[in-house]
Image (cartoon, rainbow, N blue to C red):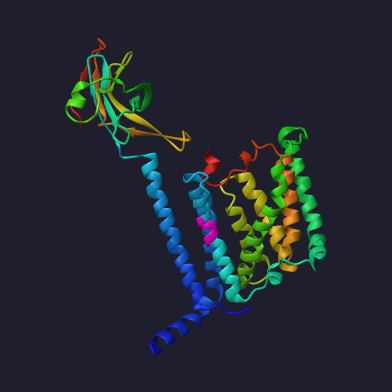
Amino acid sequence: MTELSKTENSFASSPVLEGRSLALWEIASVATSCLIAEWVVLSFAGRSKLTIAIPTLLALGLMYFSHRERGETLREIGFRTDNFFAACRLLLLPTAVVMALIVTLGWLASHSISLAPWRNRFLLLPLWALFQQYVLNGFINRRAQLALGRGTTSVLLVALVFSLFHFPNPMLAILTFVGGLIWAAVYQRQPNLFALALSHALSSVTLALAISPKLLESLRVGFKYFG
Amino acid sequence: MKNPSTRLVHVLIGKSIIETLVVGALAVFTFITILPPYFHGWGEVTNNGISGWVVNNASPWERVEVQLFVDGKFAGVGIADQSRPDVSAAGWARDPWHGYSFRLTSLRLRYHEARVYALHDSGRGARKSLQLVGDPIPFFVDDQGTITRLPSK
């Protein structure tokens, strides 16, 4: 029993598993769940909600457990309002520039600014954006900072992971890489998920309205991209 | 931020194991759904083409759709619904209506290879797969257009 406790303690206090590796492992694990959902489940199990729920719930379960284990509060994660306007101020210019670029791209592609029809499902976009921002920044960015420290390297890792989730759609992969860079950098300065979700939702609606679905391959990712 | 306990490592390992099992189960399920191992049949050279029979053992009364490829190129499609009493008599099918035949015309003078595939729908028609029925069928077309069977490789 004493031997077992010793082993467990040495395992727990292993500097490798406590630090970078564990945080990177957590990122890899959540990313794997997302990729399994996109590339395997959605492609081969159709729209079976139960099957899609498995990797989703596993990832959410891990994130919840990890937050609890590390003693992170909702406020620390970014579900807060005190820095909402400060985060919005940081996001205003880059979001406006990205939206302008998206509209320009749409114009260059079709030589006209033709708005796609409004869809009621756009109303749910803020919630979907909040969920994505929670996973991307509330979890992945926080673990990236644990592993690589605050700054360029961790911001790049977050953007790369976000872009990877949108492969092999080239247009989406590029756009999400840029978006990931902006949102990760802002989160590291002002961790507010509501402001990030607002910027994300606005950019997504602009994208869906201004760029033809053909150019974006109907926003398909994973195996679905191929048809 | 607190340092996590070993339980987090255990959860990570457990999650990986569950995901591996889910992906493995899904791979097996997908293989069985898309390429079910229920098709049986045979094809052979006749005087003017290729004929044979196909049965879907999972659905014995179904008339299977078949496609013919000659030298790797699509050459025809048909339904295996012709009478083949020998097939049912030999116990391969429950009724005799599982035969197919393709006429081969305008083939060049040379050796050819025909392959007959059973077409299978899955995902409510979202996916279609082809399964080779029997073995590839080698044959020779002479300058008179006569088809001669060759021994299988």
Residue B114 is inside the magenta segment: no
Residue A33 in the figure: left or right of residue A93? left
Residue A132 in the figure: left or right of residue A116? left
**Above or below B41: residue A39:** below
Using the rendered view, name the quadrant where residue B45 is placed: top left
Closer to us: B129 or A176: B129
**Above or below A154: residue B96:** above
- At 81% across and 65% down in the image, what residue appears? A86
**Above or below A115: residue B72:** above
- At 29% across and 35% down in the image, what residue appears? B57
Instruction: Tally the numbered discs.
Output: 0
The x and y percentages for residue A208 are: 70, 42
Using the rendered view, name the quadrant where residue A152 is placed: bottom right
Dominant SS of magenta comes to helix
Residue A58 in the figure: left or right of residue B45? right
Using the rendered view, name the quadrant where residue B37 is placed: top left
The x and y percentages for residue B58 are: 31, 36
The x and y percentages for residue A129 are: 68, 54
The x and y percentages for residue A141 are: 64, 65
Span of residues in magenta: A54-58
Closer to us: A215 or B8: B8
**Above or below A42: residue A194:** below
Residue B30 in the figure: left or right of residue A65? left
